[in-house]
Amino acid sequence: MAEGSARRRRGGGRAGNAARRGGAVIEQMDWRLPVNTDKPTEPLNEEGVEAIHIGAMRILEEIGIEFYNEEAKAILKEAGCTVDGDNVRMGRDFVMEMVGKAPSQFTMTPRNPDRALTVGGDKILFGNVSSPPNYWDVEQGKKVPGTRDMCANLLKLSQYFNCIHFVGGYPVEPVDIHASVRHLDVLYDKLTLTDKVAHAYSLGKERVEDVMEMVRISGGWTDEEFESGPKMYTNINSTSPLKHDEPMMDGWIRLARRNQGLVVTPFTLAGAMAPVTMAGAVAQSLAEGLCAVALAQYIRPGAACVIGTFTSNVDMKSGAPAFGTPEYMRATQMTGQLARFYGLPMRSSGVCAANVPDGQAMWETSNSLWASVQSGTNLVYHAAGWLEGGLIASPEKFVMDCEILQQIQRYMEPAITATTEDDIALDAIKAVGNDGHFFGIEHTQERYTTAFYQPFLSDWRNYEGWEAAGGVWTPERAHKIYKEIIANFEAPPMDEAIREELAEFVERRKEEGGAPTDF
Amino acid sequence: MAEGSARRRRGGGRAGNAARRGGAVIEQMDWRLPVNTDKPTEPLNEEGVEAIHIGAMRILEEIGIEFYNEEAKAILKEAGCTVDGDNVRMGRDFVMEMVGKAPSQFTMTPRNPDRALTVGGDKILFGNVSSPPNYWDVEQGKKVPGTRDMCANLLKLSQYFNCIHFVGGYPVEPVDIHASVRHLDVLYDKLTLTDKVAHAYSLGKERVEDVMEMVRISGGWTDEEFESGPKMYTNINSTSPLKHDEPMMDGWIRLARRNQGLVVTPFTLAGAMAPVTMAGAVAQSLAEGLCAVALAQYIRPGAACVIGTFTSNVDMKSGAPAFGTPEYMRATQMTGQLARFYGLPMRSSGVCAANVPDGQAMWETSNSLWASVQSGTNLVYHAAGWLEGGLIASPEKFVMDCEILQQIQRYMEPAITATTEDDIALDAIKAVGNDGHFFGIEHTQERYTTAFYQPFLSDWRNYEGWEAAGGVWTPERAHKIYKEIIANFEAPPMDEAIREELAEFVERRKEEGGAPTDF
């Protein structure tokens, strides 16, 4: 499907009209980098922050992290850390010195410079669901393995919605493509169907290098230009408790050397891979993250690092992971306090345990998205499309989540809470008096079209109007919008020479056999 | 149904066993008055608070409020206000002097003293949906007028769930009971099916007096005891813009004189009954509320007053009210800042515009409930069961909302964010090391059963487990729980003499014709 669309674009020049058609499926908010003006919710006092910090430092000093990567160990040994087999211990002075070199804010610039992202500070940015092996939609009504078509459609949604700022991992794992060449096909799709900041999985050097090369080609950059500042990023997960794997560390080092974005996100599920107490799980998560940040800063002082959190809890009955819980919210807020303590940008997620896009999915997702706002999160992963604890991607859930994301963006607009004389509107109140209506007056008419958030998915008709229109529940309405967006989608413009260079690179690397699959 | 259950209770003494059976339908959180420890979200700076305050004061001074109630006007005239026909203007010195007499916190004690409520300060309390004329459930699958049975079932849910702290207006309007005696039957049901703080509609003196008398009987109180402190409350709505109606004011005065709880909640829909700008709508809402508080404090200094907010916005396309929007959230937060400025307890709501308990219902309701947390709200009306902008009550929505309310209660528990040495769990992390699992260790096992929130409605199984169990979506799961709760419900104990006195009162007042219906 993606290649078909690419061929169509070669045959004609209807991009402008098509883009306008595509844009008209729904009226959505303009692209912007939302500024989170809310003071973060801070459940910890100063002593609490200090206690978690000391906990993280003592883990690094007294227990150590296992690094299953020879290069990482050699670098850390050179840096003065205590390396014993795979175990690496590092002192708090070293960690804090290294972390102090990391910028609190940096820029990532994709092939379309209008989509450049400021990561850190008061910005909150959203990305698509990443990495589910399975897919669910209203039409299929069941869980099925992901395919390249499904993946491409979710990439189209990621491009279409202005409230999605970056394109994370594969929005669904296309298991119909052989693992050796999957990254080539999906990155071709991602770089041609979207013009937003892209991501490389750290799953072996060939994949990482291929993706960096493809992103470099997509921007028409020389190697020097590519390395002049982050154009893309990787996200690595530690293997909790207290381990960093070979391929993840390899990708981390490669991207650090080439000055790309680095996000480290331990998956510290309290009661399973981390202590049952949330403060303990957060301390462990920070230790696992900070040692990777320290490594990156030693390799390249000033490297663009983000500390991620994925601290949640298990179901007490089954041991299954739970998401968007009260414990998840508080862990995210606590991590936010520590991220500010360390001066690092922060990543969290939009998550749920629900299997279908129903009420549970929405309260769990709302809980996690509001926690990202409350914690001062800068990058919100999985912000649209996630189900079943990340095992299912769903286009309806994607569309529903984007309605929430737009509401959060609108919530951030200072216009809502402005208190100028015009906003207090005493003259309007006087004019209407005790027996009138505000609808028809000038003060209203002048502001009416922009005064309030306008949803694209919420149905605000009364029951009778809603019923007369078919009585359609939210997932079915989302399905219709998803299908219309896909039907009207046109990829963002790309220089034909660049597209050909990308296609040739993919072809050549496929001929070479792609990447090993024995990792 | 309610009377049937009352008769059964006369015939036997199985209340204890039955209560245990009823309690076992789900495992729910214990009754508690949740303490909101979060610092409120404050979008306004000091100047913004001052600007809205001045706006409210100037509305009261320069425009005035129309009081369609002779007694209210006479009292306010005596107090020194400028009365011109129905228009009453009052100076800011008078308003602030009166508001200064209101307590920032008070107690309401229903017939069961264990259900006493502290209103104000850092407490956040939740009440059932109130006043929808219609009903929807999964079984009916359509909107139907409310009946006494439906109303009684929703009262049973209100009693059953420990996260529901007070019983507001009729959870659905039972239109199968004649309006002249409806209050008698519903209050009989409410006072026998629940033992939580109850509410009287201010819809004419007979209704208000009947309800006060029935609450007095329910507690076995003398008149003096009844008036020694609030046992119940009323909620009045101004008729925006800038009017207070005859029956609402009548009830307000009657409850003030008898020292009962007083909640005033203007319904200032921005762009319709209030300015299109949220700061203007909030200023108008405060003016409409504060003049009622001033009246109550003049009648009885120290009267238990609560300032309510119901400021939302209209749909730009249809003019229909919208709920749980970004603008609603910010208006609630702004009102919270002003309520603290005035030192008054605050009421807001759990609301949505959705017609059925689907995804939209849950993101809108989540938005409004989190806004109640963020604003420092003390009483959350309509916190469970509300659909279609308050035109529909739904038992499934009730059960779903209670799952959210329990999560908010759990979110408030300081245990989640504790940072003692035991919580940081360094010894546990050391014991597990780099290659273990936390599940089986003592630190986990000791804390496992209480460490995390345990949902009663969320399904945390994986897709296959959920599918094998029937693949049931949230509303259908909620329906099943609702039916089980009703089937197992037993009313809280009540002294038989009191029940008979209540029944005789209802009978006598029915013989007298109840209340006039020409209001």
Image (tube, coloured by chain):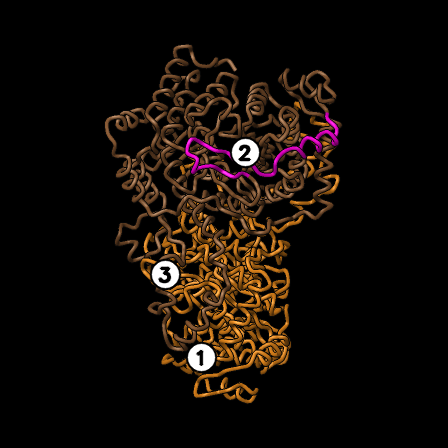
Chain colours: A brown, B orange
Comes first in the chain, label 2 or label 3: 2
Q: Which numbered tag is attached to residue A21?
A: none
- The residue under label 2 is A320
Mark 3 is surrounded, within 10 Å at the Cα level, by few (under 14), some (14 to 19) or many (20 or more) other residues, namely: some
Is B334 rendered above or below residue B467?
below
- Give the Cα separation between the discs numbered 2 and 3: 48 Å
Q: Which residue is mark 3?
A: A448
2 vs 3, front mark: 3
Looking at the image, is A453 positioned above or below residue A93? Answer: below
Q: Is residue B339 visible?
A: yes
Residues drawn in magenta? A90-119
Above or below B80: residue B468: above
Image quarter for residue B2? bottom left
Q: Regarding mark 1 in the picture, which secondary structure is present there?
A: helix
Residue ID for mark 1: B247
Q: Nearer the viewer, mark 2 or mark 1?
A: 1
Which of discs 3 and 1 lies nearer the camera? The answer is 3
Image check: B228 left or right of B355?
A: right
* Distance from Cα at disc 2 to Cα at disc 1: 55 Å
The residue drawn where x is 25% and y is 32% is A13
Circle 2 SS class: loop
